[in-house]
Image: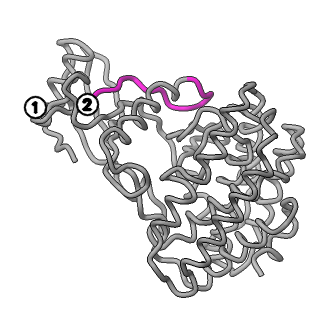
């Protein structure tokens, strides 16, 4: 991966923002502010840049992507993701804006793309605290606040709002379903990343999950009317709350358009995961927030059919949170319940939020 130097950053800032630009500081954004107690794996290391343009002080975040097994093996893979970030971030409401996209040359200078070796994207800085902090507070036994409920409602309504923008493109909807199964960051990329055997998790089990998800892909094939504007990776680590219910979102991923169930399951499985870690079942504040999210989303969007499309997306998110790569510190008991959840949701004709504990066995 490229090595950042003060000299290279200073030259880049002057080339991009003008000769009056002066680098004040740069620092890796700390793990404590971007990762929770459970989540460990990440695609890159963001760096906060603070600089002056004349008298104006500005902060930005420079992000790169490291080589890895989730469809990021080649420089072209990583370039595709970074270029897509730059192109799409500004079109999603509340998303931080991308200010520039560029690359590193062979001498680690930040340069034009003509001599690119690796790419980066420069985003605006957004203050706030990751939403996972709220969930970790509740997991420690703190009381459910009115603000917790208001934030859940705000997130669900936000999804209903962005999903209200539709696109008519049958082939694109089919592609997004196909990518759910075969993309390096999605189901097959995840199953390939599991160890050959990890306790009860065997190749046969992972193959059965893949096959069930592909059956769901065919079941959803003709639902192209559902193609909507999406975030694509709407989990607590990509939501920054400030005071009250004011928030920004980060790092939308993989596709500007997709199935709304992808976003809804990406967030709500985190209520389940955190509750399983704390109590071994969905209960207490997490059960309240889980049901509140689903009820609010369906009421605000009018999309009752989302429960008929959620299963393979819950399987995808379940494979993430049950993964020993992404979440190495989970107990085998929590992983077993997550896999029961995956299998039972895939086996049901539609997802029923009130049956979560039954799905977990």
* Percent of width and height locating residue 345: 78, 67
Secondary structure of residue under mark 1: helix
Nearest the viewer among 52 and 204 is 204
For the point 55% across and 83% down, which residue is it? 331
Q: Residues within 10 Å of mark 1 (few under 14, many from 20)?
A: few
Please provide the residue range marked out in magenta.
91-102
* Percent of width and height locating residue 291: 83, 59
For the point 71% across and 65% down, which residue is it? 212
* Percent of width and height locating residue 225: 81, 32
Whether residue 2 is situated above or below residue 278 in the rendered picture: above
Side of 66 where 317 appears, left or right: right
Residue bearing mark 1: 7
Q: If you read the primary sequence from the N terminus, does the residue marked by circle 2 or circle 1 appear first?
A: 1
- Give the image quarter of residue 317: bottom right
- Give the image quarter of residue 47: top left
Secondary structure of residue under mark 2: strand
Side of 275 where 59 appears, left or right: left
Q: Is residue 222 magenta?
A: no
Between circles 2 and 1, the one closer to the viewer is 2
Nearest the viewer among 82 and 94 is 82
Residue bearing mark 2: 103
């Amino acid at each position: 991966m490229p090595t950042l130097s003060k000299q290279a950053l200073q030259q880049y800032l002057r080339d991009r923002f003008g000769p009056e630009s002066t680098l004040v500081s740069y620092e890796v954004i700390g793990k404590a502010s971007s990762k929770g107690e459970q989540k460990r794996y990440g695609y890159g290391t963001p760096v906060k840049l603070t600089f002056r343009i004349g008298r104006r002080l500005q902060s930005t975040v420079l992000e790169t992507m490291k080589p890895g097994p989730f469809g990021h093996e080649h420089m072209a893979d990583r370039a595709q993701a970074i270029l897509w970030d730059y192109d799409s971030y500004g079109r999603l409401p509340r998303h931080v804006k991308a200010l520039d996209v560029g690359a590193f040359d062979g001498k680690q200078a930040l340069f034009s793309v003509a001599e690119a070796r690796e790419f980066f994207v420069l985003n605006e800085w957004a203050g706030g605290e990751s939403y996972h902090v709220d969930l970790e507070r509740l997991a420690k036994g703190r009381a459910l606040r009115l603000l917790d409920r208001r934030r859940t409602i705000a997130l669900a309504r936000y999804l209903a709002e962005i999903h209200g923008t539709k696109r008519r493109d049958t082939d694109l909807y089919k592609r997004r379903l196909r990518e759910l199964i075969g993309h390096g960051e999605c189901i097959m990329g995840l199953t390939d990343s599991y160890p050959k055997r990890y306790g009860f998790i065997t190749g046969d089990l992972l193959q059965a999950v893949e096959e069930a998800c592909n059956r769901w892909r065919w079941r959803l094939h003709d639902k192209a009317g559902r193609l909507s504007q999406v975030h694509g990776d709407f989990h607590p680590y990509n939501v920054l709350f400030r005071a009250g219910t004011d928030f920004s979102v980060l790092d939308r991923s993989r596709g500007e358009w997709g199935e709304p169930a992808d976003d809804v399951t990406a967030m709500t499985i985190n209520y389940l995961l955190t509750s399983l870690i704390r109590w071994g079942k969905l209960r207490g504040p997490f059960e309240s927030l889980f049901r509140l999210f689903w009820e609010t989303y369906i009421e605000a969007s009018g999309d009752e059919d989302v429960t008929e499309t959620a299963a393979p997306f819950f399987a995808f998110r379940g494979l993430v949170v049950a993964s020993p790569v992404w979440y190495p510190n989970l107990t085998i008991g929590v992983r077993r319940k997550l896999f029961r959840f995956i299998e039972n949701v895939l086996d049901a004709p539609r997802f029923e939020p009130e049956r979560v504990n039954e799905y977990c066995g």
